[in-house]
Image (cartoon, grey):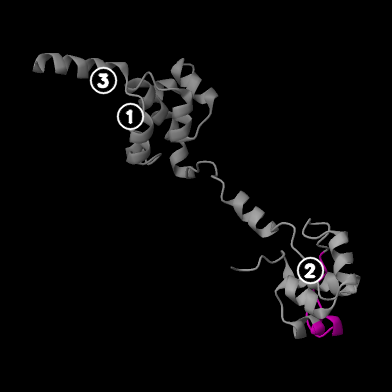
């Protein structure tokens, strides 16, 4: 099991050396550094240009925990929360769909294609596929789009606005009423 370390370990060690009476071993254990490196920080030989970072302000330590370890030289500091893990988990969240600048002019044609050949499709599904706004979808649906006369229904997969698997997942998720009727009539004729 790996030990969770504070964010900006050397900067945290600099602050702890300058602002507490903790032993070098306690600071080294908490920051994941060697004891001699912490001693070098105290002597000014190591990390001379690093500005100390207060682990209390970032929520990694409490004053009480520092006071407890200052009183008992055998006690170790305990990291309250791993800020680095919190930052990484928020960075992994799905970002908005990015469309290259060269493809952005094709979005209205793609929306027109979806509305023409899949009229039951919802605005949410179109936004999921193409990454556009409700205002643009509604203006094309209501034929009030400023450049409506020049729109051509073009396949969004061929335009590169989404992949075929994304298209299938969204459009075929709820089949249209027409395809259900076609499937029912095919079953009747086969009997």
Residue 100 lies, in percent from the top left, at 47, 45
Q: Quadrant of the C terminus?
A: top left
Q: Disc 2 vs disc 3: which is toward the camera?
A: 2
Per the picture, the main secondary structure of the magenta-coloured stretch is loop
Residue 41 lies, in percent from the top left, at 81, 80
Mark 3 and mark 1: Cα distance apart in space: 10 Å
Q: Is 173 left or right of 3, judged from the image as shown?
A: left
Mark 1 and mark 2: Cα distance apart in space: 53 Å
Q: Disc 1 vs disc 2: which is toward the camera?
A: 2
- Assess whether residue 43 is covered by the magenta stretch: yes
Of the numbered discs 1 and 2, the one sitting upstream in the chain is: 2
- Give whichever of 75, 44 is nearer the camera: 75
Residue 105 lies, in percent from the top left, at 45, 35
Q: Quadrant of the N terminus?
A: bottom right
Residue 140 lies in what quarter of the image? top left
Of the numbered discs 3 and 1, the one sitting upstream in the chain is: 1
**Residue plotted at (75% across, 71% down):** 30
Residue 96 lies, in percent from the top left, at 54, 41
Q: Report which residue position mark 3 lands on.
A: 179
Q: Report which residue position mark 2 lands on.
A: 12
Of the numbered discs 2 and 3, the one sitting upstream in the chain is: 2
């Amino acid at each position: 099991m790996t030990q969770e370390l504070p964010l900006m370990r050397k900067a945290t060690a600099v602050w702890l050396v300058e602002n507490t009476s903790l032993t070098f071993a306690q600071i080294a254990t908490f920051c994941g550094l060697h004891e001699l490196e912490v001693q070098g920080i105290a002597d000014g030989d190591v990390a001379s240009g690093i500005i100390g970072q207060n682990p209390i302000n970032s929520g990694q330590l409490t004053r009480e925990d520092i006071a407890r370890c200052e009183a008992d030289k055998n006690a170790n500091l305990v990291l309250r929360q791993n800020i680095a893990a919190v930052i990484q988990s928020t960075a992994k969240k799905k970002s908005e769909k990015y469309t290259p600048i060269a493809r952005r002019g094709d979005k209205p044609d793609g929306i027109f294609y979806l509305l023409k050949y899949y009229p039951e499709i919802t605005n949410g599904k179109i936004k999921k596929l193409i990454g556009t706004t409700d205002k643009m979808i509604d203006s094309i649906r209501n034929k009030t789009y400023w450049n409506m006369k020049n729109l051509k229904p073009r396949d969004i997969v061929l335009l590169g606005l989404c992949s075929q698997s994304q298209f299938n997942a969204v459009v075929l998720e709820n089949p249209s009423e027409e395809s259900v009727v076609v499937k029912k009539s095919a079953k009747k004729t086969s009997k």
